[in-house]
Amino acid sequence: MARELLRIGAAAVSKGEPFVWASGMLAPFYCDNRLTLSYPEVRRMLTDGFAEKAAGLEFDCVAGVATAGIAHAAFLADRLSLPLVYVRPEPKGHGHQNQIEGSLAEGTRVLMIEDLVATGLSAIQAAEAVKNATGFMPVATLAIFTYKLDGVAERFAEKGSPLVTLSSFDTLLVEGLETGYWGPEMVEILREWRNSYQAWTFANWR
């Protein structure tokens, strides 16, 4: 999966201004998994991977985290012939003012799909919305990619919805070095950033 993310250009290093995450953090690197939607072979690989990770888990419904997790949740739900819902960051301000779109009854066991996990705050917020609706946290949160920031996986475990991903920042660095996508110097720069990402944000804030 890491090789495919590199091949389609999803993994990018900023050549100018740093990337801004949804959390407000700054970073010299970003993994844009939305690009995977344009490559049928990569979409199938992701769906295969999610189906493999989901094997053995007991759940009745697949939930996608808006917006980037929705498509991948839909592909998996279709593969497994299961209901699909998606979760907004907050209730919408019109109509039924739903935060969860689709039919989700109390007691439903949910598998949640996200595209990328950085700090994990948005995915955990979505998981708690699922708990409010069903009485249970999602049985697991599956994602394409994680930066593996300190404490994030533990935060999911503490909430009762373990995080399982198809690829990670460390794997991407190894693959990028082996394939010549990045040189050793860039890999070291990226590794140092990840290990001190908060300090990097403060140092580069304008």
Image (cartoon, helix red, strand yellow):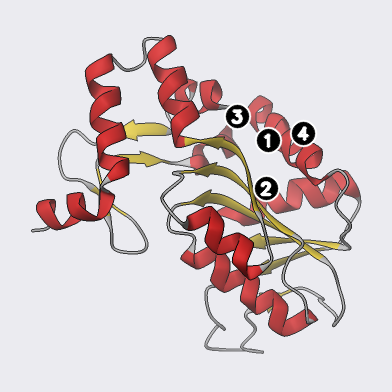
**Where residue 196 sits: x, y (%)?**
25, 47
- How many C-alpha atoms fall within 10 Å of the one at disc 1: few (<14), some, or many (≥20)? many
In depth, the one of 35 and 95 nearer the eye is: 35
Tag count: 4
Q: Amino acid at mark 1?
A: Leu
Query: Of callouts 4 and 2, which one flags the residue occurring earlier in the amino acid sequence?
Result: 4
The disc placed on residue 46 is 1
Q: Residues within 10 Å of mark 2 (few under 14, many from 20)?
A: many
* Label 4 SS: helix
> Which quadrant of the figure has residue 206?
bottom left
The residue at which mark 2 appears reads as 72
Which residue is rendered at x = 55% and y = 58% of the image? 154
Q: Which mark is residue 48?
A: 4
Q: Nearer the viewer, mark 3 or mark 2?
A: 2
Label located before the other in sequence (3 or 1): 3
* Quadrant where the image shows the N terminus: top right
Residue 39 tag number: 3
Q: Quadrant of residue 11?
A: top left
Q: Residue at x 45, y 24 (%)?
A: 6
Comes first in the chain, label 1 or label 2: 1
Dots 1, 2 in contact, CB < 8 A: yes
Q: Amino acid at mark 4?
A: Asp
